């Protein structure tokens, strides 16, 4: 999931090099933990893998922040477009429904037969 998020952020121009380097460091910690486990050094293996898990949690937060920074202009443009559309619609409704200057009251709706 993290690599998919990084690919998505990269498509918007974010610099994902630092995150990828940290992923490689965490992968090295995982491999070191496996080596300790195979050598029957369970306490050291547990300590290393817990460190890797906490580093990975911090890495996920940093990746989400990187994605948010990359999409800042997209979010801002979307917000401005929605706000502008809302203001135009509000003005049209206010002009037509509240002011009613453009419309006159209808006297009759049918032809008057004499």
Image (cartoon, grey):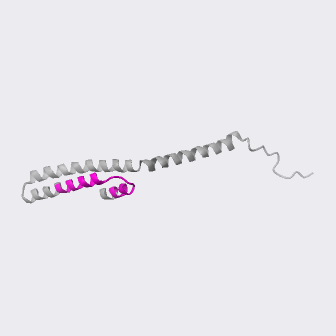
Residue at the top extreme, as displayed: 99
Q: Quadrant of the N terminus?
A: bottom left
- Residue 75 lies, in percent from the top left, at 45, 48
Residue that appears at 13% across and 56% down: 32
x then y, percent, for residue 108: 82, 48
Q: Residue furthest right?
A: 114
Residue 48 is left or right of residue 66, and the answer is left
Marks counted in the figure total: 0
Q: Nearer the viewer, residue 14 or 33?
A: 14
Q: Which residues are magenta?
A: 5-28
> Which is the main secondary structure of the residues drawn in magenta?
helix
Q: Is residue 29 left or right of residue 109?
A: left
Left or right: residue 17 versus residue 114 is left
**28 on left or right of 59:** left
Residue ID at (88%, 51%): 112
Q: Is residue 22 magenta?
A: yes
| Depth check, front residue: 20 or 52 | 20
Q: Residue at x 11, y 58 (%)?
A: 35
> Residue 18 appears at what percent x and percent y?
27, 51
Q: Nearer the viewer, residue 63 or 38?
A: 63
Identity of the residue drawn at 38% across and 50% down: 70
């Amino acid at each position: 999931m993290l690599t998919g998020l990084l690919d998505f952020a990269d498509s918007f121009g974010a610099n994902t090099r630092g995150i990828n380097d940290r992923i490689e460091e965490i992968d090295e910690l995982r491999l070191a933990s496996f080596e300790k486990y195979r050598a029957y050094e369970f306490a050291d293996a547990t300590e290393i893998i817990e460190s890797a898990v906490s580093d990975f949690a911090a890495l996920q937060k940093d990746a989400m922040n990187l994605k948010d920074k990359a999409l800042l202009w997209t979010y801002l443009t979307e917000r401005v477009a929605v706000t502008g559309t809302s203001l135009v619609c509000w003005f049209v409704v206010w002009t037509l429904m509240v002011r009613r200057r453009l419309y006159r009251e209808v006297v009759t709706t049918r032809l008057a037969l004499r």
